[in-house]
Image (cartoon, rainbow, N blue to C red):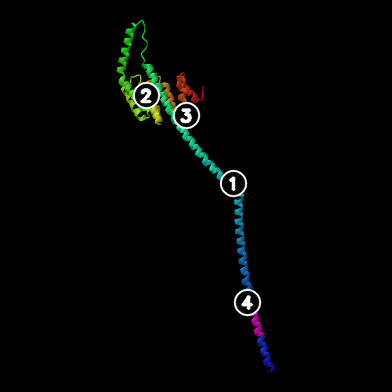
Amino acid sequence: MDASLKMRRAAALATFALFALGGVGQLAHAGVFDDDEARKRITATNLRIDQLQKDLEDRVATLERQLKSGALVDLANSVEGLKSDVAKIRGQIEVLTYELDQSQKRQRDLYVDLDARLRKLEGAPGPATSDAAPADTAAASAAGAAGAGATSNAPEQRAYDAALEQFKRGDYQSAITGFTAFVKTYPKSSLAPSAQYWIGNAHFARKDYKAAIASQRQLLLTWPDSSKVPDALLNVASAQSELGDNAAARRTLEELIGKFPQSDAATKAKQRLGQR
């Protein structure tokens, strides 16, 4: 082989070698670039994971501090305590309501008994005088008068007692109807003021406080000299208090004390006002 051919082959091999080395370099450069990009993405992902983990750890640490400090436990205990207190208060209210109902019933029975005793005293005949007639004649005259009075007042008394019995049974509407009919039928009766008083008291028992006040005011207007007036004023004050008008109730109690200072109703009025 001549020298010129050898030189051409050597040049070709050199050129191929340079080309091959250049391709490898390009491939190597491309490989390095892809690897750097991947590393960047992996680094960014790791940073994000680290941040999420830190946030989670911070939240867990906060919950642990709250649990250690007892804040949540104290809150739960407070809620349970409040539930228990509410249950106790409800029970106490039920007991107080029952006691109030019983007290009102005893008060009604007391008024009924007192009214019956007063009526017996008012209807009892007076003592016979020795100088008016002989003893046997006076006794006979008194007995005859009492019998005549009892006979003439029998329907009146029965009507009153029937309405009063309805009140005692707790049938307040029927009692109102009965006593109202009594007042209309026997407006001049000595029992008419008492009947009007029981009308107001029955309205109060039905919690119709405005009607109770109106009924008792009618008693005060029609029979201002009745022995029932102090009790009527006391009932008016009670109804005003139930309506939330404490100022009016106080004025009524003061009126009662001023006009009837020696009455039992005035004593109760003083107790309500905190007086002695």
Mark 2 → mark 1, Cα distance in angstroms: 64 Å
Which of the 4 image quadrants contains residue 42?
A: bottom right
Q: Is residue 183 visible?
A: no
Quickly name the residue at label 4: 27
Work out whether mark 4 precedes mark 3 in sequence or the reverse, and give the earlier one.
4
Residue 167, image x and y in percent?
37, 27
Image vertical order of residue 137 relative to residue 187, above or below? above
The answer to whether residue 39 is left or right of residue 95 is right
Residue count near mark 1 (Cα–Cα under 10 Å), binned few <14, some 14–19, many ≥20: few
Quickly name the residue at label 1: 71
Of all residues, the one furthest to the front in this rendering is: 136
Out of 85 and 193, give the one closest to the viewer: 85
Out of 275 and 217, give the one closest to the viewer: 275
Which amino acid type is shown beneath numbered disc 3? Asn
Marks 2,1: beta carbons within 8 A: no
Q: Which residues are magenta?
A: 14-22
